[in-house]
């Protein structure tokens, strides 16, 4: 079945081993377990963080619309946000499966995810804690050769908001920035009569990639509005915490990254390895997952077990079973 995986023999043993090791690691750090349903009612119209056009839907016997889970973190946040009598912050470890209408870059339409969330803490310390847990999760599984790529949605987003691009041109611009396509950027500049300062900011973002202090210093110089400057300041704060705790060697920055601003609201990160074409881990601050006046803040990450299993096989890692 294309996009839906069977696990047999050694692959099944590896998958069980990976899941048990991760859940044990989260439990040792006092994260409470939560599992979400794979099927639930279609109720995502009010939240643009979830693209309803990418969900798998069906009609229930009573005529109501049901859907397969498109995003585990969204359901976790919605459920915890309703638990008003529990003291914040709440630390939870989630496990479940999400489903895609269109296959991801690895050809999967069903993916097992395990991850962690801190709900009700908007601090830089909570963001650093999640990045550290993502790193230590990989180390626990015996994966060493990887990097964590960091960015902030408001760095590039702050500049883009100044331009009032149409939805179609917004996508063209973010793609051109990531590809360093200066010709397309110049066409956009002429179409929207953008200042040279804004164009230089777009063109320079491609150079703001790499390790540590130099990238952040250059990013601070190139921040041409308060939103982008605040984003850099937050990245610097998280970077200082991670450096102090000894995790600097794992970190890269790419300020040209543009994540979905309806989903992410701050720091974003992904964990990459040469053994996989797709990230093993994706995460960040997702305060937009609850859109109400008293909604919880949320920062977390999810580990793609499908990709981890492929990485295990590519590295030749064997497990007993």
Image (spheres, helix red, strand yellow):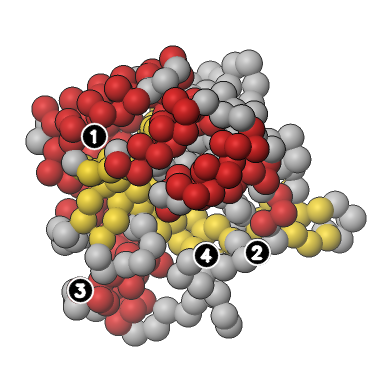
**Secondary structure of residue under mark 4:** loop
User: Disc 3 to disc 2, how far (Cα)?
Assistant: 30 Å
**Secondary structure of residue under mark 3:** helix
Q: Residues within 10 Å of mark 1 (few under 14, many from 20)?
A: some
Which of the two discs, 3 and 1, sits closer to the camera? 1
Q: Nearer the viewer, residue 43 or 151?
A: 151
Residue 93 visible to the viewer: no
- Position of residue 76 relative to residue 118, above or below, is below
Of mark 3 and mark 2, the one earlier in the sequence is 2
Residue identifier under label 2? 101
- Position of residue 179 relative to residue 49, above or below, is below
Residue 85 visible to the viewer: yes
- Position of residue 290 relative to residue 44, above or below, is above
Q: Mark 3 near mark 1, Cβ–Cβ under 8 Å?
A: no
**Residue 215 tag number:** 1
Of mark 3 and mark 1, the one earlier in the sequence is 1
The image quarter containing residue 197 is top left
**Residue 104 tag number:** 4
Residue identifier under label 3? 315
Q: Quadrant of the N terminus?
A: bottom right
Which of the two discs, 4 and 1, sits closer to the camera? 1
**Secondary structure of residue under mark 1:** helix
Q: Residues within 10 Å of mark 2 (few under 14, many from 20)?
A: some
User: Disc 3 to disc 1, how far (Cα)?
Assistant: 31 Å
């Amino acid at each position: 079945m294309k996009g839906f995986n069977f696990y047999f023999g050694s692959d099944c043993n590896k998958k069980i081993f990976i899941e048990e090791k991760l859940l044990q690691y989260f439990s040792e750090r006092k994260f409470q377990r939560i599992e979400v349903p794979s099927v639930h009612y279609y109720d995502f119209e009010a939240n643009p963080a979830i693209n309803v056009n990418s969900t798998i839907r069906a009609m229930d016997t009573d005529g109501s619309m049901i859907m397969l889970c498109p995003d585990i973190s969204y359901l976790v946040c919605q459920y915890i946000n309703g638990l008003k009598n529990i003291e914040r912050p709440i630390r939870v470890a989630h496990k479940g499966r999400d489903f895609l209408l269109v296959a991801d870059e690895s050809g999967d339409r069903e993916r097992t995810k395990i991850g962690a969330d801190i709900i009700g803490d908007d601090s830089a310390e909570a963001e650093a804690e999640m990045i550290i847990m993502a790193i230590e999760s990989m180390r626990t599984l015996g994966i060493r050769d990887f990097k964590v790529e960091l960015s902030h949605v408001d760095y590039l987003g702050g500049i883009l908001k100044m331009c009032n691009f149409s939805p179609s041109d917004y996508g063209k611009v973010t793609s051109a920035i990531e590809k360093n396509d200066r010709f397309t950027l110049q066409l956009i500049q002429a179409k929207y009569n953008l200042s040279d300062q804004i164009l230089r900011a777009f063109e320079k973002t491609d150079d703001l990639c790499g390790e540590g202090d130099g990238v952040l210093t250059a990013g601070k110089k190139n921040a041409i509005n308060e939103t982008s400057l605040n984003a850099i300041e937050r990245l610097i704060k998280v970077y200082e915490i991670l450096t102090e705790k000894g995790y600097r060697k794992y970190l890269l920055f790419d300020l040209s990254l543009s994540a979905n601003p309806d989903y992410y609201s701050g720091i974003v990160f992904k964990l990459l390895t040469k053994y996989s074409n797709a990230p093993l881990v994706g995460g960040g601050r997702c305060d937009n997952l609850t859109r109400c006046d008293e909604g919880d803040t949320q920062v977390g990450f999810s580990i793609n077990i499908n990709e981890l299993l492929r990485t295990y096989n590519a590295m030749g890692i064997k497990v007993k079973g």
